[in-house]
Image (cartoon, rainbow, N blue to C red):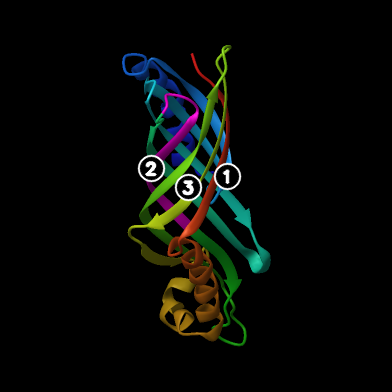
Amino acid sequence: MNQKLRIALAVFTVLIPNASFALFIQSGPSLTLGIPHALNLAYDGRLTPEYSAGLSLGGLNVPLQNGITLGISNAELRGRWHPWGGSLFVGAMLGGQTIYGKGSRSITVTPVYSPMINAEAKVTGAYLTPHFGWLWIFGSGFTLGFELGLQLPLSSKTTITTSSKDPLAAEFMTVIQASPEYQKLESDIEEGANKIGKLKIPYSAFRIGWMF
């Protein structure tokens, strides 16, 4: 998890609970495990018996083969309607996510010079996730939840950047970017990021937390 996300999570856990007491009749933090966002820290509350809302932040890095690393971070705002005032609900999430892939590879410039080049691709975009599920709040405040839905991409933008710690690499960057090794590295990273960023993805989440 990167530094900016850790700072955002720290601010989230301190400020949101203090502001929420005036809005919710019952509220509290929770941890969600799911797909496509594997790990999220959330804060949810019941506005009325029929309506609840919340927001969440998350992120995860996954190392793959060939020196490639994929990661994802996200922020979401959600609303739910509980038609009978109980645990069953239907709802929607509006979120933004950044999916990134990065890797390093030795690129042959001359027979005696092969600098290490770092490449990173980022896919940023917004999404909408209609879903349904159950949010159980027990008398003690202990909370469990389960949700199913579909994440629909609303927008997607891909950017690719390259860098090298080798001071001579900048002088050869045009040659490097035209090399078959670099083209393969760039293609591998972009393909991995785009596969997730531009697809409709089934959504599921298991929630455990506490409400006060």
Query: To which residue does mark 3 refer?
Result: 73
The amino acid beneath tag 2 is Ala
Residues in magenta? Answer: 84-99
Q: CA distance from mark 2 to mark 1?
A: 16 Å
Q: Residue at x 56, y 86 (%)?
A: 110
- Neighbor class of circle 2 (other Cα within 10 Å; few <14, some 14-19, many 20+) is some
Q: Where on the picture, by quarter, is residue 20? A: top left
For residue 53, above or below residue 158: above
Give residue 183's position: percent from left, percent from top.
50, 80
The amino acid beneath tag 1 is Gly
Query: To which residue does mark 2 refer?
Result: 92
* Residue 38 seen by the camera: no
Query: To which residue does mark 1 refer?
Result: 34
Q: Is residue 114 left or right of residue 83?
A: right
| Circle 2 SS class | strand
Q: Where on the picture, by quarter, is residue 174? A: bottom left
For residue 150, above or below residue 31: below
Q: Does the magenta-highlighted stretch encompass residue 147?
A: no
